Image (tube, rainbow, N blue to C red):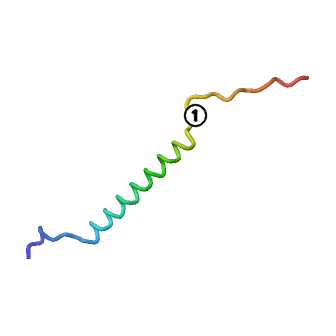
Amino acid sequence: MNDDNVIDLSRERDKRVHDRHEKRLNEVREAFVQALPLAKAKKKPKGKPKKP
């Protein structure tokens, strides 16, 4: 058997598992962005000045 044609099955499985986890992570991230969109470039008001 030639070493060039040998496939490391555990490495291929790890890649597949990683891809599944990455896909799920992206789905959850998208759901959070839709539910709780981040405010972009919105400045926080300083509020009322204190009275002396």
Q: Nearer the viewer, residue 39 or 46?
A: 39
Q: Is residue 17 above or below residue 38?
A: below
Which residue is drawn at the image coordinates 73% and 26% (left, top)?
Answer: 46
Residue type, label 1: Ala
State the image coordinates of residue 18 (x, y, percent, origin top left).
36, 61
Q: Quadrant of the N terminus?
A: bottom left
Give the farthest residue toward the right.
52
Q: Read off the residue under disc 1.
A: 39
Taking the image as shown, residue 7 lies to the left or right of residue 22, namely: left
Q: In which quarter of the image is the C terminus?
A: top right
Taking the image as shown, residue 52 lies to the left or right of residue 37, namely: right
Taking the image as shown, residue 40 lies to the left or right of residue 3, namely: right
State the image coordinates of residue 5 (x, y, percent, origin top left).
12, 69
Q: Nearer the viewer, residue 14 or 32?
A: 32
Q: In this view, does 11 lie above or below 31?
A: below
Q: Residues within 10 Å of mark 1 (few under 14, many from 20)?
A: few
Give the farthest residue toward the bottom.
1
State the image coordinates of residue 40 (x, y, percent, origin top left).
55, 31
Which residue is drawn at the image coordinates 44% and 54% (left, top)?
Answer: 25
Residue 48 quadrant: top right
State the image coordinates of residue 2 (x, y, percent, origin top left).
8, 73
Q: How many marks?
A: 1
Q: Nearer the viewer, residue 12 or 52?
A: 12
Q: Is mark 1 on a helix, strand or loop?
A: loop
Q: In this view, does 33 lie above or below 5?
A: above
Residue 36 quadrant: top right
Which residue is drawn at the image coordinates 44% and 51% (left, top)?
Answer: 27
